[in-house]
Image (cartoon, rainbow, N blue to C red):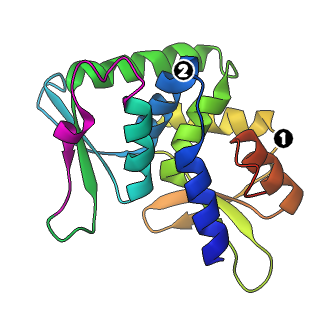
Amino acid sequence: MEKLTNRLWDEWVLFAQRAEETQEEIDGILSGMDLVSSSSNGKDKIHLGSRRLWVFRRLRRLWNSSSWKGLQELGELLSVPREKHGRILLTLPGRLYSEVQERNAEVFKKLFSRPVPWFRGIWGNLGSLYLPRFGYYLALKQPQEDQTRLRLQGILRGLNVRASSRRRGRRAEWLVRDQQTISRVLECLGLTKTV
């Protein structure tokens, strides 16, 4: 399992994104992060968090080829805990986060327009592949925001993915146990070496 998981995340981080899809994948990554806090009016600063280091490795690769690179360096926006484990925080200017939400709302109206880059982005924060003693399964945590959850459900439906649902801690997640369906999802994400 360790080798499969490492292969999956290495392939995800190093995936060669087309330039025109970069911003949409960044939007997916940010949509999958937890909203930790925001300033009182939500316009000054937004704090997003993730415990997955590879998400920030991927974000750095994408950031450097996005239109946001000229606005601010990604490293200046990150806060890594002293102990080097726990939640890494990304502090975004409110206007950048508003841009992401506006683009998500626009794309949500056209639910299936180019879902792959956004889906690939959100996968980094919410997706997992497990190999217990018997068979393997894919898990997707359900996003906090309703609109994001509905968009992700629409993408899964469009891929003809049948998933069961379970509660895990404070969050629900979708589970896929059918190996052909798991392969189809991984292929959609561009993770062909993992398949």
Q: As shown in the figure, which amino acid type bears the numbered disc 2? A: Ala
Image coords of residue 76 (percent x, y): 17, 38
Residue 132 position, x and y percent, is 69, 81
Residue 119 drawn at (x, y percent): 61, 37
Q: Residue at x 77, y 37 (%)?
A: 157
Q: In the rendered image, which quarter is residue 26 located in?
A: top left
Which quadrant, please, contains the C terminus? Answer: bottom right
Image quadrant for the N terminus? bottom right
Q: Classify 10 Å Cα crowding around label 2: few (below 14), some (14-19), many (20 and above).
A: few
Q: Evaluate if marks 2 and 1 touch, with contact meaning CB atoms under 8 Å apart.
A: no
User: What amino acid is found at the position of numbered circle 1 in the picture?
Assistant: Asn
Q: Is residue 41 visible?
A: yes
Asked whether 57 falls inside the magenta stretch, the response is: no
> Which residues are the magenta region?
64-81
Q: Label 2: which residue?
A: 19
* x then y, percent, for residue 172: 54, 58
For residue 78, what is the image quadrant?
A: top left
As helix, strand or loop, the secondary structure at mark 1 comes to loop
Residue at 51% across, 25% down: 22
Drawn side of residue 85 relative to residue 110, left or right: left
Q: Residues within 10 Å of mark 1 (few under 14, many from 20)?
A: few
Mark in front: 2 vs 1? 2
Say which residue appears at 58% left-offset and 31% top-offset: 17
Residue 140 visible (yes or no): no
- Sequence-wise, the earlier of marks 2 and 1 is 2
Query: Furthest residue to the right?
Result: 180
Q: CA distance from mark 2 to mark 1?
A: 28 Å
Identify residue for label 1.
160
Q: Is residue 154 left or right of residue 85?
A: right
Q: Is residue 90 above or below residue 154?
A: below
